[in-house]
Image: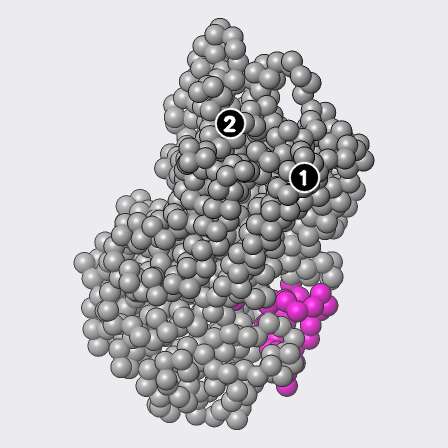
């Protein structure tokens, strides 16, 4: 049986590693929201395998080992086949609008290749759980342990071999599983040798097995075809390509989803400042980069740059005499090349003794000390990575929440300046005002100034917002305006508030429901509980600027640019498609087995209860997991560490809980209520104490925060691992195909629950979403009681 366990572990490991790898690939070749959509659609097939097995269950006496060995072999082959398939079938989503028939056919062919590995993996799990139902508590432990390891392995493997290399490893682990499942010793040895050879290939290639871009995002696809890419690296957070643009270097994040630039600099700060002040040469994107530093010139100011990227903000600080700059960048490889390969090109700014350039996350860096700065600066800082955001369904923006602004304000000196360039300034002001109010401060309008390009037909996505901890003076405002051309106007002027587009209410930190409803986009302040700053859309119709109702041209234009063909909202289309697919698959998963499988057509006690039970478990577990990833972002900080810690701790704890439940005798007859009581108790305690618990560790080293997070997650995860195997034990003696059907419903609602967690957190927040997960397990508790009663009543 140990070989079955190892084989199951390998499949679980590779399935999660494959899923995460493909998410990273589609972040690059498409966009993160579309990556979420296509991988979610493929994951439906994980549960679809259960429907297939319920319709065609293995007959008694069938060669289970041989069947599993074949499935694992084909899983290995089709996993590796994704590399050439995605390169040979490039798909641009715009084709769905320009050539809908051809575009749809191309997408379906690509989707077919994506679904096969997940369908085969699902068949393997279904077969093992059905054939060895009496050992489910141990098997489920191996399953969850494998998935936990797969989550961890991606981090160290992605930079050296890339996602293409990981597909080779996926194939390798699939072959190992095939050998373990087989009864033939010859095939066992052959499979292991093949696995070793295939797994070694990416380590000896001397470069990545690359995926071709499907869309030309910011010229990256064209640059690759023209051989202009000088350097590429699959950082665990974002893929980085450095492109030679002639007069500068383009740092493309995730295939062009985001960009930064290294502008050539000879290191002479005095000459640079003279050139800027006399208007010679091209050294910055514009005065919006250096205006705050100019206000502090020659004062030896101390600066924090969140999102150091290509280094322009750091260069601006040094140019105006900063005594110290902490330059924090989420993608470590960008700092690495700035210090090494492109150090001479950028004037060695990251190696300057006054600069501390490090990999890190801005808010966790701030929380690690009580240091105060003269300037805290962020220029268009947000990530396009699904892993960094926790889910690609809807990007979270923790740098634009009220809690974030409180951290910025509390780390500024008495006359310090918060300098932010980001889109949708009305929402930024509403969010910052809430923070200002919660800190007990008043008259926020006196402390904030916003400059934006005011030109017909021009969409300014990066207005400049400056918040000073002392009220602005007339002389200071005149100096600020002097650094900008006439087209850039002061649209928020603290000395002339009557000319502002925004009313006094926006600066109060307390927007009324009437105002929130009146504005044509989602204007309410973003918080850590609802960190969806960029989720702006209220309608699917084109908008016109309406200053009387606080809608400026740039915000209206931004929302309109996301309406493909004038009516399809590309910013939420993935949610609409996934929601529609969920509805379709729910009907399919319920009614096809009900009318066409033996398990469905046969009357047996607790049929409906068992389906509801496994559905609740699937939705509840994934809601806990995805919501914890977001909540623990505050404690751990660095997104990749948060994702890995939460998933690993939850799965390892659940696996341990599953196997312990078998050893202590938790069955449908004895102690069956313990898992549910444990889940409900631990989840409620976690919900009640996590914020106070986080405060105890926010200033401790990262390793301590990771350990503290694991300690808080582990008890709940331990009990979460018990209800699923308990349910399998309950229906183990029901008609053939029953376990497969239960597996299908569990898998289906894992996907549906993932979508539900996003929608719930957007509209109600993470705390309410966690409460929904608790209610699902409470409902599962009641449903299992009903199922248990029905089974024992039928047994007499």
Q: Nearer the viewer, residue 210 or 750?
A: 750
**Residue 607 position (above or below residue 178):** below
Q: In this view, does 583 lie above or below 547?
A: above
Q: How many labels does the image show?
A: 2
- Viewer-nearest residue: 78 or 609: 609
Seen at 39% across and 26% down, the residue is 203
* Residue with the most extreme front position: 796
Give me the disc on residue 205.
none
Q: Which of the image's four quarters has the C terminus?
A: top right
Residue 549 counted in the magenta span? yes
Q: In the image, 598: left or right of 474?
A: right
* Above or below, 442 relative to 767: below
At a point 44% along the width and 76% down the height, the residue shown is: 432
SS under mark 1: helix
Residue at the disc numbered 2: 135
Is residue 699 visible in the rendered image? The answer is: yes
Which mark is in front, 2 or 1? 1
Of callouts 2 and 1, which one flags the residue occurring earlier in the amino acid sequence?
Answer: 2
Q: Where does label 1 land, which residue?
A: 793
Residue that protrudes farthest toward the right in the picture: 595
Place of residue 108 in the rendered image (x, y in percent of width and height, measured from the top left): 71, 37
Query: Cα distance, mark 2 to mark 1?
Result: 25 Å
Label 2: element kind: helix
Q: Is residue 192 above or below residue 304?
A: above
Q: What stretch is highlighted in magenta?
A: 533-561
Q: Quadrant of residue 476?
A: bottom left
At a point 64% along the width and 47% down the height, the residue shown is 786
Return the residue nearer the eye: 639 or 422. Answer: 639
């Amino acid at each position: 049986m140990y070989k079955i366990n190892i084989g199951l572990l390998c499949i679980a490991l590779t399935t999660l590693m494959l899923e995460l790898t493909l998410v990273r690939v589609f972040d690059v070749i498409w966009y993160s929201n579309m990556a979420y959509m296509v991988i979610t659609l493929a994951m439906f097939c994980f549960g679809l395998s259960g429907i297939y097995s319920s319709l065609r269950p293995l007959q008694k006496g069938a060669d289970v080992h041989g069947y599993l060995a074949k499935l694992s072999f084909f899983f290995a082959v089709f996993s590796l086949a994704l590399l050439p398939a995605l390169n040979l079938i490039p798909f641009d989503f715009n084709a769905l609008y320009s050539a809908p028939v051809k575009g749809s056919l191309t997408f379906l062919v690509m989707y077919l290749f994506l679904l096969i590995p997940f369908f085969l993996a699902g068949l393997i799990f279904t077969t093992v759980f059905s054939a060895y139902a009496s050992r489910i508590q141990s098997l489920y432990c191996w399953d969850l342990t494998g998935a936990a390891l797969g989550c961890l392995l991606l981090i160290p493997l992605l930079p050296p071999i890339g996602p293409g290399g990981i597909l080779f490893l996926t194939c390798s682990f699939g072959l190992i599983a095939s050998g373990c499942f087989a009864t033939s010793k010859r095939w066992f040895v052959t499979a292991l040798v093949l696995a070793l050879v295939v797994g070694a290939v990416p380590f000896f290639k001397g470069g990545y097995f690359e995926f071709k871009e499907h869309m030309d995002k910011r010229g990256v696809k064209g640059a690759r075809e023209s051989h202009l890419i000088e350097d590429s690296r699959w950082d665990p957070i974002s893929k980085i390509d450095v492109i030679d643009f002639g007069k500068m270097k383009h740092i493309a994040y995730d295939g062009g989803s985001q960009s930064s630039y290294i502008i050539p600099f000879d290191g002479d700060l005095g000459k640079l400042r003279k050139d800027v002040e006399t208007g010679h040469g091209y050294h910055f994107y514009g005065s919006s980069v250096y205006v705050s530093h100019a206000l502090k010139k020659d004062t030896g100011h101390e600066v924090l740059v969140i999102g150091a990227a290509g280094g322009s903000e750091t260069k601006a600080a040094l140019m105006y005499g900063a005594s110290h700059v902490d330059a924090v960048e989420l993608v470590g490889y960008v700092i690495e090349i700035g210090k090494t390969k492109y150090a001479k090109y950028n004037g060695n700014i990251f190696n300057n003794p006054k600069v501390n350039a490090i990999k890190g996350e801005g808010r966790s860096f701030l929380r690690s000390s009580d240091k105060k700065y003269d300037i805290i600066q962020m220029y268009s800082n947000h990530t396009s990575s699904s892993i960094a955001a926790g889910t690609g369904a809807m990007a979270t923006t923790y740098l634009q929440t009220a809690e974030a602004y409180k951290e910025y304000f509390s780390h500024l000196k008495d006359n310090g300046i918060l300098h932010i360039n980001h889109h949708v300034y009305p929402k930024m002001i509403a969010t910052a005002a809430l923070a200002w109010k919660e800190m007990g401060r008043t008259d926020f309008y006196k402390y904030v100034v916003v400059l934006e390009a005011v030109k017909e037909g021009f969409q300014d996505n990066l207005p400049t917002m400056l918040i000073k901890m002392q009220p602005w003076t007339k002389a200071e405002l005149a100096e600020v305006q002097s650094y900008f051309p006439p087209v850039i106007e002061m649209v928020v002027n603290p000395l002339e508030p009557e000319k502002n587009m925004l009313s006094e209410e926006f600066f109060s930190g307390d927007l009324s429901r009437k105002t929130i409803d009146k504005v044509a986009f989602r204007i309410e302040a973003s918080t850590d509980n609802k960190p969806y700053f960029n989720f702006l859309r209220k309608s699917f119709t084109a908008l016109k600027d309406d200053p009387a109702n606080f809608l400026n041209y740039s915000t209206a234009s931004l929302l309109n640019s996301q309406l493909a063909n004038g009516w399809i909202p590309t910013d939420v289309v993935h949610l609409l498609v996934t929601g529609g697919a969920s509805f379709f698959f729910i009907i399919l998963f319920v009614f096809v087995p009900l009318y066409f499988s033996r398990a469905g057509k046969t009357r047996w006690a607790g049929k409906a209860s068992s389906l509801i039970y496994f559905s609740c478990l699937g939705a509840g577990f994934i809601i806990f997991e995805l919501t914890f990833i977001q909540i623990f972002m505050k404690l751990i900080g660095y997104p990749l560490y948060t994702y890995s810690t939460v998933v690993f701790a939850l799965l390892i704890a659940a696996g341990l809980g599953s196997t312990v439940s078998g050893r202590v005798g938790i069955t449908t007859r004895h102690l069956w209520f313990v898992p549910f009581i444990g889940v409900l108790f631990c989840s409620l305690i976690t919900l009640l104490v996590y914020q106070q618990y986080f405060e105890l560790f926010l200033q401790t080293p990262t390793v301590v925060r990771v350990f503290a997070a694991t300690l808080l997650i582990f008890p709940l995860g331990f009990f979460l691992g018990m209800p699923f195997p308990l349910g399998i034990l309950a229906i183990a003696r029901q008609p053939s195909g029953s376990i497969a059907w239960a597996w299908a419903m569990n898998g289906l609602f894992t996907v549906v629950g993932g979508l539900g967690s996003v929608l719930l957190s957007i509209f109600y927040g993470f705390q309410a979403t966690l409460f929904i997960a608790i209610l699902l397990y409470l409902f599962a508790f009641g449903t299992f009681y009903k199922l248990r009663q029905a089974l024992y009543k039928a047994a007499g």
